[in-house]
Amino acid sequence: MTKTRRPIGPKVAFPGRRGGGAGEPAAHPVPPPVAPNVERPLLIDSREVSRLIGLGRTKTFQLMASGELPTIRLGRCVRVPRVALEAWIADRTSSRDSDAFVP
């Protein structure tokens, strides 16, 4: 038979514990807002690319490996130039718009 757990009081728990020591989960971290005058990186990694284009990391890796997305290799690091990604998206959307619906 197992022992019952003792309640955690504020004096028993470590004072530096998240949630004030009462055992509550910490709030989800919220990224800081991006200020308009802050410089964005010129080269972005696969996680950021997948977040920006709204695809999963696996699909992003496939696009990068096939050469469909423009990439730059720096040693073992593979990065996508932000300007080239924006041009890639603009190229895909402009060709789709011209072939799409015509009233």
Image (cartoon, grey):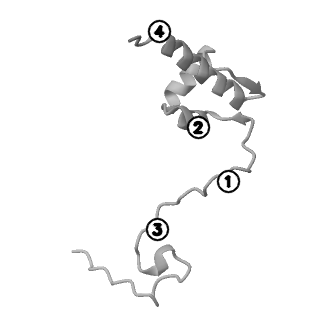
Q: Nearer the viewer, residue 56 or 4?
A: 56
Q: Quadrant of the C terminus?
A: top left
| SS state under label 3 | loop
Task: Tell which tag, 1 or 3, sits nearer the viewer.
Answer: 1
Residue extending furthest left? Answer: 1
Q: Residues within 10 Å of mark 3 (few under 14, many from 20)?
A: few
| SS state under label 4 | helix
Answer whether labels 1 and 3 touch (C-beta < 8 Å). Answer: no
Q: Residue at x 40, y 73 (%)?
A: 24
Q: Nearer the viewer, residue 4 or 17?
A: 17
x then y, percent, for residue 32: 61, 58
Q: Is residue 94 above or below residue 79?
A: above
Task: Tell which tag, 3 or 4, sits nearer the viewer.
Answer: 4
Amino acid beneath label 2: Arg
| SS state under label 1 | loop
Q: Quick check: 55 left or right of 88?
A: left
Amino acid beneath label 1: Ala
Label 2 or label 1, whichever comes before in sequence order: 1
Q: CA distance from mark 1 to mark 3?
A: 26 Å
Q: Which residue is mark 3?
A: 26
Q: Residue at x 47, y 75 (%)?
A: 19
Residue 99 shows which numbered tag? 4
Res 90 → quadrant: top right
Label 1 or label 3, whichever comes before in sequence order: 3
Q: Which residue is mark 2?
A: 47
Q: CA distance from mark 3 to mark 4?
A: 50 Å
Q: CA distance from mark 1 to mark 4?
A: 37 Å
Label 2 or label 3, whichever comes before in sequence order: 3
